[in-house]
Image (cartoon, rainbow, N blue to C red):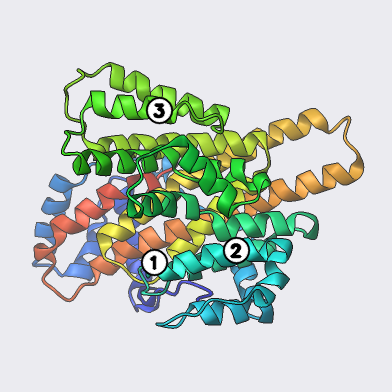
Amino acid sequence: MILRVDYPIELHKNYSLGEEMLESILKGSLDKSAMKEIWGDSIYPKIENALLSSLTLDGATEYNLRRVEKIATPLFDSRERLSQNEKYNLIQKKLTPHEPTLPTQEELKPMFNSNSSKIQKILKIGLDSGLKRKNKKSITTHWNRVAGSLSELVDDDSKNFYTFLGESHDFFEDFFPRLSMKNNQPYLLKNEQNFFFNYFPEQFHEPLRALSNYFGMQIAYGKKHSEREGSSFTNKYFGNYLRNVLKSPNLTENMKNSGEHLMRILDFMGPKEIIDPETLRMLAYNLYNQNLEKYSIEKSPLIYLIKVVDRSDNNLDGDSGHIFRISNLNKTNRIIRHGKNVVIGHKSKYSDIKSTAQTKEIEKYDSEINLLENCLNELEYETVRSAKNMIIEDMFKETLPTEYVGQFAEKINQLISIFYETSP
């Protein structure tokens, strides 16, 4: 099990020089002495000119640079404890091999108790699908790591609830469209409802909907159906489809509001206009994050903790190309931003209930808010660290610097929101 991200670049003899160089770039002024030392007297002027023409850092100052001091390491600590957890490791060892095997209900029971049969059913579908993560392991290994980390982070009285959500958090979004398409079913509300009752106990329905990028899933689902029917993915086609989705009695109030927001955007477009699915997907992803933030403030900070643990695990999931890494870091940054809003929202609620709540309730609530806040701090620290090291790695590439300086500058531009508290 991976416990920590290690960056070989941090052992480079000139790493501190690379840090100075990056900081000078982000402050809007290039450190010429550092440039000379890194790239040499003859080449650095070309690098300087290329950077000045490629970077979009107008107005950058040292005052809005993001500086994160790590307060605690609850995510790392939970993974370290998990590596010593025999009950968890017994399950993970069955899921990890190239040809994984399904854990028995008896093996699942110590982690999932009365929900073991439901979890086994979910794991079987995940294993049978053959879907892999970036590290070439079954997607079920990720589900189980998230569940395992939550079992180490959350107190005993709510451990079973959040462990189940951790194991099943991706299942609706990933497998409802897949299983429906496999059975050649159109989108029907009764199919969606049957899916939930088939795989999840009722107390998990609402939080699992909130944890799913529901409208992103519907966009992908609607697009596939339009292709099967030979229809264009127009405003009219998706609008009719979305109206059907919004009839679901199971949608939370926040989800209905998100769907109606999508409908208002469609109303600005002509009925025959072809929709760009990527634009819609990005909109749906932003609505999803806002939705989850609101739901977590209404219910519990631990709902959002599931997303934080999920994202932390994604960041440990093996090496990938720089495009995927940049996208992953920017997604993480959005989650951090929304997570901070959840903390602020709960601190406001906390001050309202403090005068009437029992001491035990106050201690529990305070503990949950602090746990989310510390996990967000650790995730933010590692996100900034990862982005910084990606840039410093490029500084010390063996190839001629002028050959990659454009890509080097573009990476900095793409990571602006991570390097700054407020983008310049």
Give the CA separation, mark 3 to mark 2: 30 Å
Q: Are marks 2 and 1 in contact (CB under 8 Å)?
A: no
Does dot 1 land on a helix, a strand or a loop? helix
Residue shown at 15% from the left, 47% from the top: 54
Mark 1 neighbour class, 10 Å CA radius: few under 14, some 14 to 19, many 20 or more: some
Look at mark 3 in the image and give the residue it sits on.
Answer: 244
The residue carrying pointer 3 sits among few (fewer than 14), some (14 to 19) or many (20 or more) residues within 10 Å by Cα, namely few
| Res 129 label | 1
Residue type of the residue flagged with mark 2 = Ile
Depth check, front residue: 180 or 349: 180
Q: Disc 3 and disc 1: Cα gap in Å?
A: 29 Å
Upstream in the sequence, badge 3 or badge 2?
2
Residue 422 seen anywhere in this rendered image of the structure: no
Q: Residue at x 55, y 37 (%)?
A: 293
Q: Is residue 264 above or below residue 289?
A: above
Badge 2 local density, few (<14 within 10 Å), some, or many (20+)? many
- Check contact, mark 3 vs mark 1: CB within 8 A: no
Q: What amino acid is at disc 3?
A: Asn
Q: Distance between the Cα atoms at labels 2 and 1?
A: 15 Å
Q: Which of the 4 image quarters holds residue 253?
A: top right
> In the picture provided, is 258 more to the left or to the right than 393?
right
Q: Where is residue 61? Give x, y as percent.
A: 36, 40
